[in-house]
Amino acid sequence: MSTTPIRPDPPPQEGRGEALVEMHRLYEVQRRACASSPAPDLRARLRSLASLAQTIDENSPAIAKAISEDFGNRSVHETYLLELVPLQNAIRHATRNLARWMRPERRRVPWVFGVNASWVQYQPLGVVGIVSPWNYPLSLSLIPTLDALAAGNRVLLKPSELTPAFSRLLQRLLAERFAEEELAVVLGGVDVAEQFIRLPLDHLLFTGSTAVGRQVMAAAAEHLTPVTLELGGKSPVVICPDYDVHAAARDITFPKLANAGQTCVAPDYALAPTAKTRALSEAVIAEARRLFPSISSNSSYTSILNDRHYHRLRNALDEARAGGAEILSCGDEPAARRMGLAVVLNPPLDCALMRDEIFGPVLPIVSYETLDEAIAFIRQRDKPLALYCLTHDLGYREAVLDRTISGGVTINGAFLHQAQENIPFGGVGRSGIGAYHGEAGFRRFSHARSVHQVRLFNVVNLAAPPYGRVARRMIRVLGSRRAADSC
Ligand code: NAD
């Protein structure tokens, strides 16, 4: 049973908007549904996963079109390869494994409890809230949703207001396929989001910036709502001394340019041996030109979401240039907010590009003399969401793995750890709290209830008062002779 209060906050006051009234209504509907049917069985959960898969499959062109409309231009291939494919894979993986994940897990019982039995039962938490960002609006809304549905929960989903066409479409598609007591989309701006995170949810998964994540955790604390925070930050790529610069350029450039760099796990900046820095920067620019021979009118190249982000990136480049950095650029198409790759050689370490998450097609390259120096550079900063290590040398690999901490790592590539269904995905420290994907997602949205069953006799009765010989013997055998002798 959920320990959440039956009623949420007082209903919204008149005039606070229809969206808030609707949000509270949906919350109430789902809370009541939890009370009447707290644990959907395997068949019901598999049906939900199948409905989700079918909704995505049947509407993929419309989804890609809506996302592209929101971005100005979002490559259809990127929507399919980086959002739709991982989402469908995740649904297939959960469908194949759900029966096993749901099974109670037997645990060993210490001899003193005789033939009793212990197991862990995985229960739905109840109403799960999901707040998603704009950069991968499909997968970052629906992968946590499918994990929460697989775990038997009700889901209230609040997608980003910055992708209005997609969010409206998602609301309509899910409403056609799902009862609102199981899954519903709440639309609205930041004002609605601020109230959404204050609902007495049974779990809240937030994906977004670290700054908003902090507010989410504070708001959730009011109801002791457990949170999973999937946040951002600066994810470095370490090019070790042995690694070929052309191979490094191939490994880094597409992950940096996919979605025009607006990816939480994009390589944010590179650390390269001083002697290789220039060759690396030229190889990265050449690779970018090979991938995208022209930026102008190239529908494969995604636009920066809005003018605010476009100008933020341009200003950050200007600041780095003014601070003495050398910038190599593939050119821009400002009218379409298409920004070609810019490589920034040795930026001042206090400029915005090196302080804040870049979230755009800009790659600063920082030189190092020894690998120890590169490792120290990472350790002196917030723990990254992702870390990339390029090396064929076991010693270098172990040094980077053992002496840094990050949410996840891909070795000799980028991105790929987050596409693995069999390992958890999440951040650490300021890049996030908790992880999901695959079994980790199922567990994240389940309560692991401990169950112990007494069978032949209850050992507690042997030790009960009035205390005498048996109690003393138990203290001696299970605790210590000194303690037994003193009572
Ligand atoms: P954001 O934090 O501005 O917004 C994310 C969501 O929070 C949106 O739905 C928005 O409506 C809501 N929101 C905004 N202000 C709020 C407030 N005051 N209270 C409650 N909710 C609020 O983030 P964004 O710009 O949409 O996304 C970019 C950030 O997300 C980057 O930092 C990126 O690294 C991070 N991100 C992380 C992951 C991950 O898996 N770790 C994935 C994608 C993006």
Image (spheres, rainbow, N blue to C red):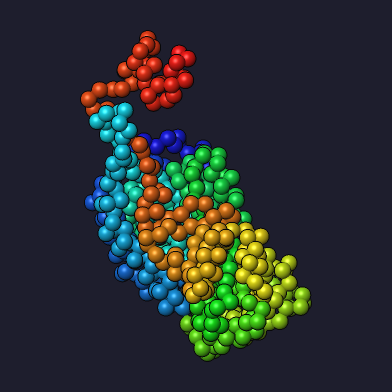
Q: Residue furthest top?
A: 466
Q: Quadrant of the C terminus?
A: top left
Q: Is residue 376 left or right of residue 184?
A: right
Q: Residue at the spot x=38%, y=67% of the render?
A: 86
Residue 37 visible within the image: no
**Quadrant location, the N terminus:** top left
Q: Please determine whether, in this image, residue 14 is positioned above or below residue 147.
A: above
Q: Position of residue 444 (x, y in %)?
A: 41, 49
Residue 76 in the image: x percent, y percent?
Answer: 43, 77
Residue 215 x %, y %: 60, 49
Q: Position of residue 127 (x, y in %)?
A: 41, 45
Residue at image coords 36%, 38%: 449
Which residue is pictured at 51% across the width and 88% down the height? 290
Name the residue rendered at 36%, 47% in the picture.
153
Above or below 252: residue 216: above
> Is any atom of residue 479 visible in this view?
yes
In this orientation, which residue lies closer to the viewer: 416 or 393? 393
Q: Answer with left or right where residue 351 lies relative to residue 433.
A: right
Q: Using the image as rendered, state which of residue 466 and residue 62 is in the foreground.
A: 466
> Against 350, is 478 above or below?
above
